[in-house]
Amino acid sequence: MINFSEILWKPQSTPRVRSSTPVPQAAEIAEELTELRQLPTEEVRILPESRIVVATNPRSPGADRFRLLRTRLRELKEVVTLQKLLITSPLPQDGKSTVILNLATVLAEHGKRSVLVLEADLYKPSLAQRLGLEVRHGLAECLEGGVDPMTALRRLEPLGWYLLPAGSARGNPTELLQSESVASVMRRLSPHFDWILIDTPPVAPLADAISLLRYVDAAMLVVRADQTPQEAVKHALETIGQKHVLGVIFNAAEGLNQSYSAYYSHYGKE
């Protein structure tokens, strides 16, 4: 079971003004929804090792914290432009991919909201493997070969969200993510989704997360409690720029989970 813990929330000091882009007409929205619904569905077998706690243990403290995070994101979405979230970490093994899998699942609300996970970790992609999916073309092929990203999407059930996997890069992944092709991919995908979560490599030692900042509304940093060095957290915040960081998520903080367990134990006796 994942030990998920406290969210240190830091809204942007200067909230972004909502875009003046014209609101899509009803016919356009219907066309976008139809295009998504025409995608074939892939059944995902959710195993304990996938660590999607909101699906395997929805009454757990970890699942509750993800639902709290969803609530706070919804609140912010009402007042600022908030659709595309970049999720990264200072170092490997901080748990960012686990956070993305759980956050996407709670945001999708069993398919009531259109949610996309874009796997932009082209060096060490892991999401498809954790979900038991066979490797197929994905973001790398879209950037290198001009593949329509809509044809590379995978609609996952019962999770209720969509995945654009990393694919297999032939060239240098960092150069791919710095190319202008990224803008084309984002323009193609953005009108179809309420939320887009972008999984990037850790801030150290790669610059991939920084390259993608211009395409997102905000970034979130996942830190493993009592493990990620303070120096690494400070470096990540400075590298990303604190004005871009919407919040810091502490993963695996034992103290909070112990207090939850004590509460539920006491509640069960009443």
Image (cartoon, rainbow, N blue to C red):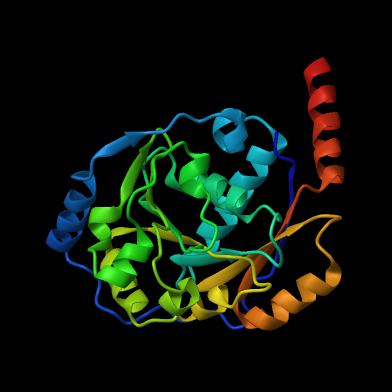
- Furthest-left residue in this view: 27
Q: Position of residue 20 (x, y in %)?
A: 32, 82
Instruction: Identify the image quadrant of the N terminus.
Output: top right
Q: Position of residue 9 (x, y in %)?
A: 69, 64
Q: Is residue 149 left or right of residue 125?
A: left
Please give the name of the residue rendered at 67% of the width and 73% of the height, measured from the top-left corner: 205
Q: Position of residue 57 (x, y in %)?
A: 62, 29
Q: Position of residue 232 (x, y in %)?
A: 78, 71
* 213 is higher (above) or lower (below) than 166: below
Kindly tell me whether residue 16 is visible in this rendering.
Answer: no
Kindly tell me whether residue 48 is visible in this rendering.
Answer: yes
Instruction: Identify the image quadrant of the C terminus.
Output: top right
- Furthest-front residue in this view: 170
Q: Is residue 118 left or right of residue 36?
A: right
Residue 243, quarter of picture: bottom right
Q: Is residue 242 left or right of residue 78?
A: right
Tag count: 0
Please give the name of the residue rendered at 40% of the width and 59% of the height, measured from the top-left corner: 168
* 230 is higher (above) or lower (below) than 260: below
